Every structure is written in C-alpha cells, then in structure tokens.
Amino acid sequence: MSFERMNPALAARLRASADLTVPAALDHRVRTALRTMPLAKRAFSLPVMALGLAIAATLAMTVSLALSLASAGAGENSVLIATTVVVGYLGFSSVVVLPLLLKLRTVRPGPETTA
Amino acid sequence: MSDTDLKLARRARRGNRQALEALYDRHKGKLLGYLFKMLGNRQTAEDVFQEVWIKVLQALPNYRPTQGSFRPWLFRVAANAAVDRLRKEKRRAGPELDAPAGGGASERVVDQIAGEAPSPESESIGTEIARDLDFALARLPERQRNAVLLRHQQGMSYNEISATLRVPEGTAKTLVHRGVRALREKLTNWSDDEL
C-alpha cells in the first residue's frame, strides 16, 4: 500500500516540507561562492586520453613511414604503402597480440592460487 | 525539466556561471527542505546546504550528463554530505551518548529535535504533529530516511532514488517500503483525523 493511501495527511505534511525558503544571508553567501570560487579543472578521462594517444601514434607512424618510403623512391605510392603497413600492423596487434596479452594476464597466478 | 537541467549542467560544466546559478535557483528550496528533514536541525541543514553547493562547484567538471539527470546527482552529493555530518556529530558526541541499538547518529538528531524551537514550517502545520513526524523520521536508519524523503518528500521515481543512492531499483523500493512501515508504526498515536 502506498504511503499516500496509508496516511494521506502525513504524506501531505511531508510534501509540504519539500520546498523551504533559503534565508537571504545564506542565499547571498552561496551565490557569491558560485560566482567567485574557481571551478575545478576538468579531469581527463583515461579511455578518451588512450584513444587520442592511439590515434596520434597511428598518424605519426603513417606519416613517418610514408616520408621514409618517399625518400627511398616509392614516389606517389608511399602514402598508400605506409597506410597499408600501419593498418595491417595495428590489425595484427589487435587480433593476435592483444588476445595473447589478455590471456597471459588471466593465467597469471593470483594470491589465492599461490597460497 | 530534466532536459533543461541537463543543458544547464552541460553549460555549467564548461564554466558558465549563469547556468550554475540557474541550477541553484531551480533546486535550492527543495535541497534545503530535504537537508532539513534529513538532519533534523535548521542550522545544521543550512551549514550542509552551503557545503553541498561548494562540493557541486568542485565536482561539476567531472559530472557526466550521459550518466543520468542532474537532480539525482545533486541529491547524491547532498545525501553524502548529510550522512557525513551525521557521522561526524556521532563521533563528536562520543560512545556514551549513542543509542544502544541501531540508533547512532539518528538518535542525536532526535535529541536535537526535542530541544529545538519549532521551525516556522512546524508552527504553521501544528507543532506537535510536525515534531512527532520529525521525531519518527529521525529514528529511521539513515538509508531508509533518505529513501523515504526522496520518494515522499521530493517525489522522486524509484529509478531516480536508485541513481541517487547508488543502489538497485529493487533495493530502493525495499528501503522506501520499510521506512514507511517503520514510520507508520512510530506514528500510531495519531489518527488520520487528528493529522
């Protein structure tokens, strides 16, 4: 049974206390704080930072490889070759190396297995 | 309302003070009403009210609008601050003043209420009944009191209560139900006509 149906008058009294007037002095203090206190710096989210780093690293690898290939005489194809190599390397890493690393982590003995 | 709250919160996160003040204006009365019933003392409620807004100012940059609406987040900050204050008062009072079983900080609130002058709100709705209600609320365990107030004073949905108290929705329902049952048991001397 709901509180309102069980005791409507009590429920109404509780509701009546829901909204109180903030005293002027307190209101002024809080407003001043909200207007003047410095806002805390926004914390960086780790996944976003990791993604940003990964993208930057990929771009850097591609550009550096393309420049090396171009200087080695690959000509117009250097960008294409560099992109293919970097994407292939990243694909290989995520499909083969990453699961392998995760597997290694899961089989690492924990405190309960060493005891 | 929640949509606008979210928009304001997003702008406030980026450092827009006007948006922050708009959020303050929107929630200040309800927040103070909640803190007053939660803490049972107007002066303490006002102290904690100020603390809460300073905490909001500090925590706002890390508030993620995608994780839910602003109101549960704000009331979570308030609930944590209120519980911290109750525990601090309990520690300050020392073990000899604590209730023997389960009361703890709530019993301190009961003591405060008993010795306190009636609030303007209490006077307007009948001091004795209002005080009995405050008394009964103060005797509830913190989590139940929180859940009952969020539900029946602030009119939050169970979903919002679950987000505020960071408990599953089923637990929120149980807390409200148990709190209401306990309140009812403590207020058996008042018939509906007298209220």
Image (cartoon, rainbow, N blue to C red):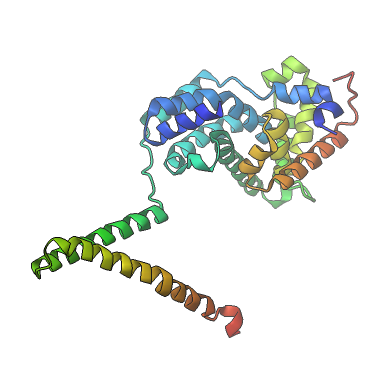
Q: Nearer the viewer, residue B171 or B100?
A: B171
The x, y position of residue B62, in whole percent, is 44, 44
Side of A32 where A9 appears, left or right: right
Residue B61 percent coordinates (x, y): 42, 41
Q: Residue at x 84, y 27 (%)?
A: A5
Question: Is B178 situated above or below A72?
Answer: above
| Residue furthest top in the image | B124
The mark tally for this picture is: 0
**Does residue A13 appear to the left or right of B23 in the view shown?**
right
**Residue B40 seen in this snapshot:** no
Nearest the viewer among B32 and B109 is B32
Q: Nearer the viewer, residue B51 or A16?
A: A16
Specify the farthest residue to the bottom. Answer: A114
Which residue is at the front of the view, A113 or B143?
A113
Residue B155, quarter of the rendered image: top right
- The C terminus of chain A lies in quadrant: bottom right
The residue that appears at 73% across and 30% down in the rendered structure is: B152
Give the answer, above or below, for where B86 lies relative to A45: above
Would residue B195 be visible to someone looking at this image? yes
Location of residue B154 with respect to A106 vertically, above or below: above
**Quadrant of the rendered structure where residue B74 is?**
top right
Q: Residue at x 71, y 33 (%)?
A: B151
Q: Position of residue A57 (x, y in %)?
A: 27, 61
x 80%, y 40%: residue: B177
Q: Specify the quadrant that holds the N terminus of chain A.
A: top right
Q: As drawn, is B131 to the left or to the right of B26?
A: right
